């Protein structure tokens, strides 16, 4: 953690939490296991004993006791003891003992921290000096957690909390947590029927519902739209491959643990964990000349990676990952132009998504310690190309020395969503390794074979993860061009059904995604339902509208735009769709 003071406050808050629970429930109610400070708070793991059970309903009581300890302004004091003394002191705590048993050096100095004269914990610290320094804290939630995160171990109870330097900072953080919860893509995805997780299919393998697929298709179409005029060509690759490909590429060795294996009747296969070696094969089946360079392949393709079940979540941590992948094969002298074009694609895409504010870029270059593949000359040229583009395109970039991949330097793009959370999404990576491994070449002006450089690039990163990010960024209220349903037609009574259906046909004819709510519900209820689904426009049709061949237009943000002729509405909504406008009709 960057801020040491905040770290000490949070770690001390965790001690105060343990102390408060001992005061309330007695020293035999639970075993303290561990409790670190984290990037946004702290947690405390313990094993309840006997019939003790903590729940979120106890939080206010525990917080009140913590407040008392803060008020008492008890000193928090560091002490050094011997290993032997420590073992004596914590003899009846199996978790502390387990840790002490791992220490083989008998002379190691053990530190403990006491709070007043009633609480002591085995701890490396550091802490604040007095409990009164913990001015603003809050308990947040309770969950189960395996000891050492290993499901073979005992399930402990974990209390999450947070603490800040002052009340304002705490309140700001709590408001952000509320907002994060409101935007949770797993909840919105369910409410709007965008995607589904099925136990029969498995964790990390989300299924897209028709409405989710509409959004995905719009993104995919848009991505292709901004690539196709820049010399890219679509390719396609199968989902499984012989192991040999990944042994040759070197990925089997590096990635082996995360690869799904498929046993065929005669041969063993891998589910592909990436597309790069496949695209290398497409390239190498051609004898390109320098006049053909650069060659640019584009493929939104699903790859599979065996991530740990416990780390999977919604759309953002998955096992089936559809990268909007692309590989460019070019000469070293062409790197700058190609990278420049990719940067312009990245900028265009994220401007459209309303995410270009506050973005920054990490330019990862070689360092003195790492092992890097390829000649100094090529590295120098590639790094210079990336740097020149970063300057020319005015990218807000930071140089990460020694952060390059072993196979080449790269640019990684961090974007902020509507609530300022940072997401690493686009990437542009130079690669000198794969062209070597697969012995790729083209024929140069002298009639000789020349090795190309490969650029790996992804704009959205992965379509699944990006969709999760987008749902949270827009809080489910997508711009019109991405909305699965762009307009909802709401006839007030049965008498307007005929006209309402006619309006629906007219809109559909123009390619507008429209639904009708012809249930015999009250108009207000229908409007509310459409608003809940974040449908941008509700077209209310009563007797008056039928007579004047118009619709009364309401927006999901409750703005009432009044009556519009059907043509007028169509012109306006189509303009928004074509412009990929972020706003609704003003
Ligand atoms: Zn501690
Ligand atoms: Zn690649």
Image: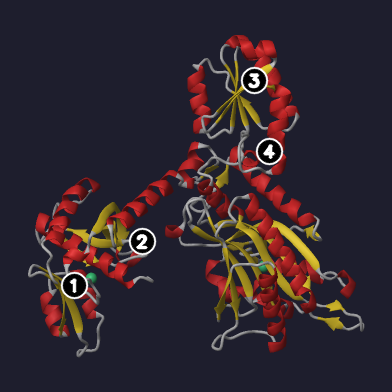
Rendering coords of residue 27 (x, y %): 10, 62
Residue depicted at x 65% and y 17%: 500
Residue 564 occupies quadrant: top right
Of residues 156 and 222, the one nearer the viewer is: 222
Helix, strand or loop at label 2? It is: loop
Residue 546 falls in which quadrant of the image?
Answer: top right
Discs 2, 3 touching: Cβ within 8 Å? no
Describe the element under mark 4 as helix, strand or loop: helix
Quickly name the residue at label 3.
551
- Chain-order first, disc 3 or disc 4: 3
Between the C-alphas of marks 4 and 1, the distance is 59 Å
Could you tell which of marks 2 and 3 lies nearer the N-terminus? 2
Residue matched to label 1: 129
- Label located before the other in sequence (4 or 1): 1
Distance, label 3 to label 1, CA atoms, is 68 Å
The local crowd at label 4, few if under 14, some if 14 to 19, many if 20 or more residues have their Cα within 10 Å, is some
Earlier sequence position, callout 3 versus callout 1: 1
Depth check, mark 4 against mark 2: the one in front is 4
Residue 40: mark = 2
Note whether ligand 2 is within 8 Å of mark 4.
Answer: no
Please say if the residues under marks 2 and 1 sit with CB atoms less than 8 Å apart.
Answer: no
SS for callout 3: strand
User: Looking at the image, is mark 2 or mark 1 earlier in the sequence?
Assistant: 2
Q: CA distance from mark 4 to mark 2?
A: 39 Å
Is the C-beta of the residue carrying label 3 under 8 Å from the nearest atom of ligand 2? no
Q: Nearer the viewer, residue 489 or 34?
A: 489
Q: Is residue 242 visible from the viewing direction of this image?
A: no
Judging by the rendered image, the residue that carries numbered circle 4 is: 576
Q: Residues within 10 Å of mark 3 (few under 14, many from 20)?
A: many
Where residue 53 appears, as percent x and y from the top left, is: 18, 51
Rate crowding at label 2 as few (under 14), some (14 to 19) or many (20 or more) other CA atoms within 10 Å: some
């Amino acid at each position: 953690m960057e801020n040491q003071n905040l770290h000490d406050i949070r770690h001390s808050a965790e001690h105060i939490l343990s102390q408060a629970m001992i005061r309330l429930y007695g020293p035999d109610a639970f075993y303290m296991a561990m409790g670190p400070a984290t990037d946004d708070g702290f947690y405390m793991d313990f094993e309840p004993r006997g019939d003790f059970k903590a729940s979120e309903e106890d939080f206010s009581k525990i917080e009140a006791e913590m407040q008392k300890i803060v008020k008492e302004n008890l000193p928090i004091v560091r002490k050094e003891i011997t290993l032997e003394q420590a073992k004596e002191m914590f003899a009846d705590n199996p978790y502390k003992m387990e840790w002490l048993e791992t220490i083989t050096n008998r002379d190691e100095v053990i530190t403990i921290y006491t709070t007043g004269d009633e609480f002591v914990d085995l701890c490396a610290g550091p802490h604040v000096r007095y409990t009164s320094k913990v001015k603003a804290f809050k308990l947040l939630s309770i969950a189960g957690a395996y000891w050492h995160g290993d499901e073979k171990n005992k399930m402990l109870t974990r209390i999450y909390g947070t603490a800040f330097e002052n009340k304002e900072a705490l309140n700001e953080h709590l408001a952000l947590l509320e907002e994060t919860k409101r935007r949770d893509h797993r909840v919105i995805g369910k409410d709007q029927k965008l995607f589904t997780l099925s136990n029969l299919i498995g964790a990390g393998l989300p299924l897209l519902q028709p409405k989710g697929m509409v959004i995905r298709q719009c993104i995919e179409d848009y991505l292709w739209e901004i690539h196709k005029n820049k010399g890219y060509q679509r390719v396609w690759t199968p989902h499984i491959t012989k192991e040999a490909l990944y042994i040759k590429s070197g990925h089997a060795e590096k990635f082996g643990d995360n690869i799904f294996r498929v046993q065929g009747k005669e041969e063993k296969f891998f589910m592909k964990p990436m597309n790069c070696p496949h695209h290398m094969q497409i390239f190498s089946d051609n004898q390109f000349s320098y006049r053909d360079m650069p060659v640019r392949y584009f493929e939104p393709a699903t790859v599979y990676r065996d991530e740990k079940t416990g780390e999977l979540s919604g759309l953002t941590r998955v096992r089936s990952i559809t990268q909007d992948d692309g590989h460019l094969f070019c000469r070293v002298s062409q790197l700058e132009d190609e990278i420049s074009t990719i940067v312009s694609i990245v900028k265009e895409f994220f401007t459209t998504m309303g995410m270009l504010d506050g973005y920054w870029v990490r330019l990862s270059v070689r360092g003195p310690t790492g092992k890097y593949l390829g000649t100094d000359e090529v590295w120098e040229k590639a790094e210079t190309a990336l740097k020149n583009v970063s300057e020319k395109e005015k990218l807000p970039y930071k140089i990460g020395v020694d952060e390059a991949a072993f196979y080449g330097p790269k640019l990684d793009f961090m974007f902020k969503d509507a609530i300022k959370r940072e997401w690493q999404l686009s990437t542009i990576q130079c690669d000198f390794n794969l062209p070597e491994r697969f012995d790729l070449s083209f024929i140069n002006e002298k009639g000789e074979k020349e090795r190309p450089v490969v650029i790996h690039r992804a704009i959205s990163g992965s379509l699944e993860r990006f969709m999760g990010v987008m749902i949270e960024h827009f809080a489910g209220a997508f711009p019109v061009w991405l909305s699965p349903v762009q307009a909802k037609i709401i006839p007030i009574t049965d008498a307007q059904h005929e006209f309402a259906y006619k309006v629906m046909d007219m809109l559909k004819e123009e390619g507008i995604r429209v639904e009708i709510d012809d249930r015999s519900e009250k108009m207000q209820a229908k409007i509310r339902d459409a608003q809940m689904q974040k449908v941008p426009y509700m077209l209310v049709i009563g007797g008056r509208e039928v007579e004047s061949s118009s619709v009364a237009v309401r927006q999901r943000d409750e703005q009432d735009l009044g009556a519009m002729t059907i043509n007028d509405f169509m012109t306006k909504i189509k303009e928004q769709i074509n412009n990929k406008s972020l706003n609704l009709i003003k």
